[in-house]
Amino acid sequence: MISSKKYIILALVVILIVGGIIGWYARNARLFLPRTVSAPTVQVRADLSSYKFINPLLFSENSQDNTAPFNQLSSKINSFIISEEKSGQATDVSVYFRDLNAARWTGVNENETYRPSSMLKVVVLMSVLKIAQDDQTFLSAKLQYKASNHADQYYKPDDALSTGYYSVQTLLNAMILDSDNDALNALLADQNVQAGFNSLYALFRLPSTSTTTPDYMSPKSYSTVFRTMYNSTIFPWDLSEQILNLLSGTTFSAGLVAGVPKGTVVAHKFGENTGVETNGTVVGRELHDCGIIYYPGRPYLLCVMTKGSDFSKLEGAISGISKIAYDFVDGGNLGK
């Protein structure tokens, strides 16, 4: 027979042991729970040999956001793309969406490649304004403009210039606001502008244009141009503000702009391309629109690239995706 005193001692020991187990588990229960492993963030830096003590940060690259709201957005966009392709509105559509203030992104076919065409005019714009940083007279300098019939453009400039000499600033406005290819050629005829373009293109880690395939730019890769402007990692703040302000005045309104409420500020650039065989047969068209939509307090980047046979149908694909993205943000999915 165990005495009552021994019962008490045994009970106390059991209580201490059980209590210790419960306490240990309470402190370490997280060891038994499934963990969400965050993918590392990659910092992309300038790596310029001209600097000894600094290595400026261009942008950070992180993994796609797979939380429920972003999965829902990509699912809606994907369903829309499937519908557009089945109905013959487009043959290929790629999308990259990014919450600019929180570094979260999602996409559909975001690594598929296209011809960037006029979207590279943004890099030319940056090249010119970078030169003007050191030479304030450059914007007033005159360059020769050789007018053409703009046969290579479906979306022709509304107010094309006539042949003559114009200030760099006038040519910049024509190139960006009306996407004038002749203004682009006039600016690139200046060796300093061409050299600056080449330098910035390499700095942004954009895909090589020397590739044999004409399709070499994806929505995700092109987005770095707008991201560096928004983050102002290349230029002084005032200059980045000037660039995006100019891009907010572009006259093309059939893409991203058509999918958001009237009056919404959109700093963007579109690009077009018509594939033509040597006998003059049109074999395909491409239309892209990429930029920043300034939703109040929650600006976001949207880049849509498309292929098809009809520009008006491609316009509809881009504006449709723009509306889906705007409704997503308007629904509070990026926070308040």
Image (tube, grey):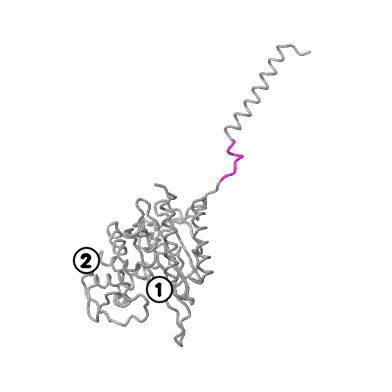
Q: Is residue 148 above or below residue 294?
A: below
- The image position of residue 70, as x and y in percent, is 49, 53
Query: For the magenta stretch, what is the residue range?
Result: 29-35
Q: Residues within 10 Å of mark 1 (few under 14, many from 20)?
A: many
Q: Position of residue 22 (x, y in %)?
A: 62, 29
Q: How many marks on residues?
A: 2
Locate residue 88 relative to residue 130 in the image: left or right: right
> Under tag 2, what secondary structure?
loop
* Residue identified by numbered label 1: 272
Displayed quadrant of residue 146:
bottom left
Examine the image and state in which quarter residue 263 appears: bottom left
Q: Secondary structure at mark 1?
A: strand
Using the image as rendered, state which of residue 311 and residue 208 is in the foreground.
311
First reached walking from the N terminus: tag 2 or tag 1: 2
Would you call the spot at circle 2 few (<14 residues within 10 Å), some (14-19), or many (20 or more)? few
- Taking the magenta stretch, the answer to whether it contains residue 34 is yes
Q: Residue at x 52, y 69 (%)?
A: 85
At label 2, the amino acid type is Gln
Q: Which residue is mark 2?
A: 136
Residue mark closest to the camera, 2 vs 1: 1
Q: Position of residue 29 (x, y in %)?
A: 59, 36
Three-letter amino acid code at disc 1?
A: Glu
